[in-house]
Amino acid sequence: MTTDQNCTSSRQCLCSETAPAPFVLVIFGASGDLTYRKLIPSLFNLFQRDLLPDKFSIVGCARTVMDDKAFRKLVSDSIREKFKNIPSKMIEVFCEGVFYTHGNYDSDETYSALSSKISDVESRHSGFAGRIFYLSVPSTIYSEIVRKLASSGLSPEPSEGQPYRRVIIEKPFGRDLQSSRQLEKELKEHLLERQIYRIDHYLGKDTVQNILMLRFANMIFEPLWNNKYIDNVQITVAESIGIEHRAGYFDKSGLLRDMFQNHMLEMLSLVAMEPPSSFDADRVRDEKLKLLSSIKAWEPDKISTEFVRAQYREAIVDGNKQQSYTEEDAVPKDSKTETFVAARLFINNWRWNGVPFYLRAGKRLRRRVSEIAVTFKNIPHSIFKPLMPEDIHQNTLVLNVQPEEGFALSIQAKKPGGKLCMGDLPMHFSYRDFFQGEPPDAYERLLLDCMLGDSTLFIRNDTIDISWTLLTPILERWAEDPSIPLASYPCGSWGPLEADAMIGKDGRKWRAP
Ligand code: BG6
């Protein structure tokens, strides 16, 4: 291993990555958008970084009729679209490991064809290879595919983990507590927990992983990380895009399912959990579970005050008209689906008792930004009379998840001028400036971890269960009680006035990111 001057330990640099053992990755839904935009570029970048083994195979599988050659063309288009100036030879070498088979996901023939394809490609690996099945298909057919993989003998592991067979799935993991439990039951009929890799792509982002480093590799934050020093925490995931071409999925889902059940609660748990004893999958996930289980459930009659749901409406943004949600293609004109949610929650434990956590996420907001802002309390007493403690700005630590990855700490400092002239001093760290480059795509990290059998950044079923336990009553209440308002906000704003009023009741404001 090499050492690097930026590394923590002078004894050992842990920045180098390990390449996994030979594998066959089967992508169901290989002709779809996720494969094209994310999976192929991420796999290719791992290849470029020498993080794929000499022997690897990627087998695309979908209903679209194509042969290996046509799929390789699609793969090379996706690579060229993402990366500039890649030598053709390099893409050709990568594509030598790319294959395709087509068929309906519910037909036995598809799995026999897949089985012979896998046998063919495995012979390239001297017969030994791990297998990963990536289900990039609607979640409604996960159970069917998993059943067929098992009955065709493709997914059972011959002996414990050797060679491994893993299945990657993405949200939605059901649409409420009951359906997620049903899905889990069906998966577990054919797979062991250790074979299931549930993706939340936010966990693959370097800046989200940095939450743990910042908290648990530094001494200066953790002693302050509690209700004695922290006034409130705000988590914002704002998107400037609308629902694009995803009306079919989004209108049935809504923002609470789409963003809160997963990304928002995952980020919350990393910010608020207790220190795990080690950076091992189960130790980290045990702490996340404990944290989520400590969130105070919302009383039914408080749901309408602790949650604001809203939908975007038409507005002129930067000189262009942006249409309302109900005017989007394939959205019913009378849709009541929320495109924005703001919520306030409390955590019932010694560390966080009394500290409000404000969460908001929405589509068509002013700009794309995801951040976690930790605001500290006012100083207890001011020596700078006539300034009172509340006249002196609170310190805020902002973890910028995207797009300007980094973090910023605002502190009070003397300004040039009068003796008591004081102001905010922003201390700002930017990943791009310091590390001179883009952080890798989240899928790269997650695919590599799955190949290596490291499930730390994947979600365990019990945390999904607890998040649905928390959110299902909200969804039910919204569905059952039409008197709970659906607010609206103009495209290009920071959300509805009702969200400002919600936080305003506590004498606070949303941060303007
Ligand atoms: C997905 C949601 O999980 O995350 C999308 O389904 C959302 O609706 C996306 O747009 C946001 O991800 P990112 O990485 O662009 O913040």
Image (spheres, rainbow, N blue to C red):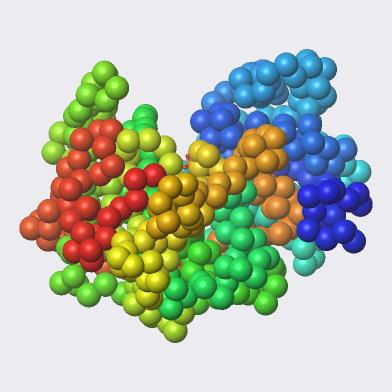
Q: Position of residue 78 (x, y in %)?
A: 62, 23
The residue sitting at 83% across, 60% down in the picture is 9
Res 434 → quadrant: top right
Residue placed most toward the observer, 107 or 219: 219
Q: Position of residue 444 (x, y in %)?
A: 67, 42
The residue sitting at 56% across, 53% down in the picture is 208
Horizontal placement of 104 versus 484: left or right? right
Horizontal placement of 113 versus 401: left or right? right
The C terminus - image quarter: top left
Residue placed most toward the observer, 324 or 5: 5
Res 454 seen here: yes
The residue sitting at 26% across, 37% down in the picture is 493
State whether residue 117 is above or below residue 413: above
Q: Residue furthest front?
A: 418
Ligand 1's quadrant is top left
Q: Residue furthest bottom?
A: 350
Q: Position of residue 48 (x, y in %)?
A: 78, 32
Residue placed most toward the observer, 477 or 341: 341
Res 287 → quadrant: bottom right
Res 252 seen here: no
State whether residue 341 is above or below residue 274: above
Q: Position of residue 292 (x, y in %)?
A: 44, 71
Horizontal placement of 4 versus 150: left or right? right
Horizontal placement of 180 versus 270: left or right? left
The residue sitting at 50% across, 64% down in the picture is 271
